[in-house]
Amino acid sequence: MSRPTELWTSWQSLARKVRSNRIWRNPLMRYVALALAAALMMIAALSPLASVMVEGWSQRDLELRARLVFRSIRDQVATGMAADLDPQLVPRFERLAEDERILALGYCTAKGELRYSTRLLPKAVTCRTVQRNKSDTFVTVRDGDARIHVSAFPITTGTTSGHLLVLHDLSYIDVRSGEARLYAMLALIGVATGLGLLATAIVLGLMRTWARSIHNAIVEVQAGSGVSATLRRSDLPISREVHAVLAEVRLERRFTEGIHVEWSPRTLHLLLQEELPGAEVLVVSNREPYIHNHENGAIKLQIPASGLVAALEPVMRACGGVWIAHGSGSADRETVDRNDRLRVPPSSPTYTLRRIWLTEEEQEGYYYGLANEGLWPLCHIAFVRPVFREADWDHYVRINERFADAVVAEATTDAPIVLVQDYHFALLPRMIRKRLPKATVIAFWHIPWPNSETFSICPWREEIIDGLLGSTILGFHTQFHCNNFLEAADRFMESRIDREFASVTLGGHETLVRPYPISIEWPPAALADQAPVTACREAVRERFSLSAETRIAVGIERFDYTKGILDRIRAIDDLLTRDADWRGKLVFIQAAAPTRSKLDAYSTLQAEAMQLAEEVNARHGNDGYKPILLNIRHHDPAEVFELFRAADICIVSSLHDGMNLVAKEFVAARDDEHGILVLSSFAGASRELGEALIVNPYDTRGMANALRTALNMSADEQRDRMRLMRDLVRQRNVYRWAAQMLLDAARLRRRETIAAADRS
Ligand code: F6P
């Protein structure tokens, strides 16, 4: 191998070693090394400059001194020249040469002869160098190792002329410039070190701030929360950039893979800001989130027992906007302003509730009639015959129009996002589309959608499907109900169905049909003030006069025939009949909120339930023990959660249910990770809460067996099941539900903007 090749190879191997050393991977170390190299280069460049400067300055100093010497003896030299020789001149020269800096003095004649000189005048200095010069001359002459500075000054007296030579030894300048170089180097090293330390401190400070910002941003990403406004304001620009980049990554990741996001009011709010900037949100539902009633001479606030309200209220608190709903409370008119509005929640308002007034007759036709005697039994398989009356339909159309008027009146832009809720407003999406063509209408059907065979019995099936197809997006809880709707649209409308993209196009307008499983807020607000589980259990036992050993099963819902209340009482009956050991040790508390009581199907159910409870209690109870405790009244959220926390078992035995949020609330209430959920396979919730004991409510024996399994389930198994369900409800909370719809809406809005630009 040749020498250069060898050298190159060794250099490469050295460079590799240096590069592979972990220390250089640290950016701070690389920065310090770079700073040191720069400082060394600066020192190497500046120190010779210091010598040059000192030399120049010293020479000028010498010339000045030489001139002073010349001036002090010029007259004597002139006199001596005139007298041809002044005997005093040489001793005088010698005295002057005693000055430590002056090496020697001499006088040169015009002919270039050295006439007078002191002893130490070196031989290397001759008069030839200055012979013909008419002005002051300064030269440096080498004498061996020494450097001699020669200053020559011309003197003329009469016809005689010559030069006075003043010689200085330059060795002291060499010493001085050496010292100067040393001091300059030390000073530069000092300055470079100081600057380096200062820069390192600044860099370390910045890095710490950046690290904190990045850490905070990552924590926010993990928490799924937004970028804190205070942080954005207070941090350095680079930190804001880091936040911005992370926010982008976060948005992209979280919004495309919603499941990874810890959805919360903050992330939902951020989504609105980032994805739908400036969009106004309007919600329309029949049921209002806050009802004011006259009670015992005072106005009392009631939060209705409604899955829809439980889900949407937290979303509205996060998003703000206007919620348009029927003002159904006896004191509702007294609590609004002159525009029928009030700010809610009453304790800390974040959005506006706009109340719409209905007459008794309108309510009869639109709400009790078409919605709850017609569409409700049509959509739920509960074997209650739907009733369709022409007059009810007319009311239904008129009330939908009234709500459409309210939407147009409340909208402050021409492209609001309108969230239309439930089967009370099947016609509203089309009405809004006609009047606000640029609006994004998201309709959500909170109840099941029947198969097209069943749906075909509705006399206004085409009008209902057409009304819903005015939406931008139509949501159901499950894919199964989406499929049923697509089937119905295919069968009854002249529309184009895209099954791959899950959309229906009617009259040139496309509607996405998607499943968005609804959920609850996490953590539920009602959990905040709850006592520990043991305290809740004691309180409930005391309220119902139960012994400490009594096992408690609960059912909590509206008194609705779709909920399977009779079926669960029958299952308890069956269990106590077959397993008499449980008599006296098990009670079932049914909290049932009266609902739609004017309707026969509901009043009959209530009567039947009371009758059945009495029979079961008579069969298995005694004076001090009733296995079935029916509690028919409205329960506020705090009471509901106390019951959930006190229970060993929660029974959700719906005959048919879109989702059923009671099941999710029970799971959310059990932060002790105990309790068993017995859940109907006909509730949408059973698709998500697979760790519940899934039952068929029509199968009394099967449900009784499930109750026995629940009563015998070990604490470990309860915890394992509950943990999985809690994880799911936490992740798939109601903010995620809203976010998924809003994200789809944002995508469609962007697509529409691009298409509009293409058209123009
Ligand atoms: O969840 C279905 C639903 O009909 C909601 O739309 C409604 O808020 C809830 O049940 C209670 O019904 P209502 O509002 O008729 O009392």
Image: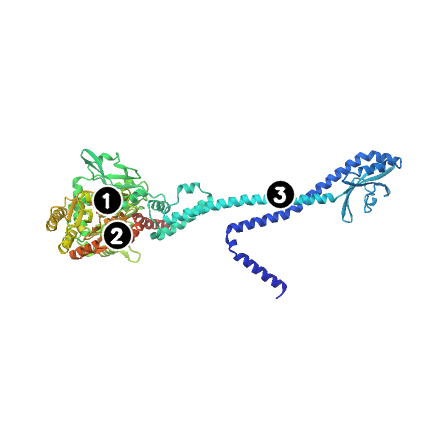
Nearer-N-terminus badge (1/2): 2
Q: Residue at x 38, y 52 (%)?
A: 253
Q: Position of residue 409 (x, y in %)?
A: 28, 39
Q: Quadrant of the N terminus?
A: bottom right
Tag count? 3
The residue that label 2 is drawn on is 477
Q: Is residue 276 left or right of residue 575?
A: right
* Mark identifier at residue 187: 3
The residue that label 1 is drawn on is 536
Q: Are marks 3 and 1 in contact (CB under 8 Å)?
A: no
Q: Which is more toward the observer, 297 or 418?
A: 297
Q: Which is more toward the observer, 242 or 159?
A: 242
> Given this view, does label 3 or label 1 mark the residue nearer the observer?
1
Q: Residues within 10 Å of mark 2 (few under 14, many from 20)?
A: many
Q: Position of residue 298 (x, y in %)?
A: 20, 33
What whole-number distance in Å separates the C-alpha atoms at marks 1 and 2? Answer: 32 Å
Q: Residue at x 24, y 35 (%)?
A: 335
Q: Is residue 418 left or right of residue 542?
A: right
Looking at the image, which residue sits at the far front?
548
Query: Element at badge 1?
Result: helix
Q: Please, what is the three-letter code of the amino acid marked with disc 1?
A: Cys
Nearer-N-terminus badge (2/3): 3
Q: Position of residue 143 (x, y in %)?
A: 78, 48
Q: Position of residue 698 (x, y in %)?
A: 16, 55
Q: Which is more toward the observer, 436 or 554?
A: 554
- In the image, residue 171 above or below residue 721: above
* Mark identifier at residue 725: none
> Given this view, does label 2 or label 3 mark the residue nearer the observer?
3
Q: Residues within 10 Å of mark 1 (few under 14, many from 20)?
A: many
Q: Which is more toward the observer, 109 or 530?
A: 530
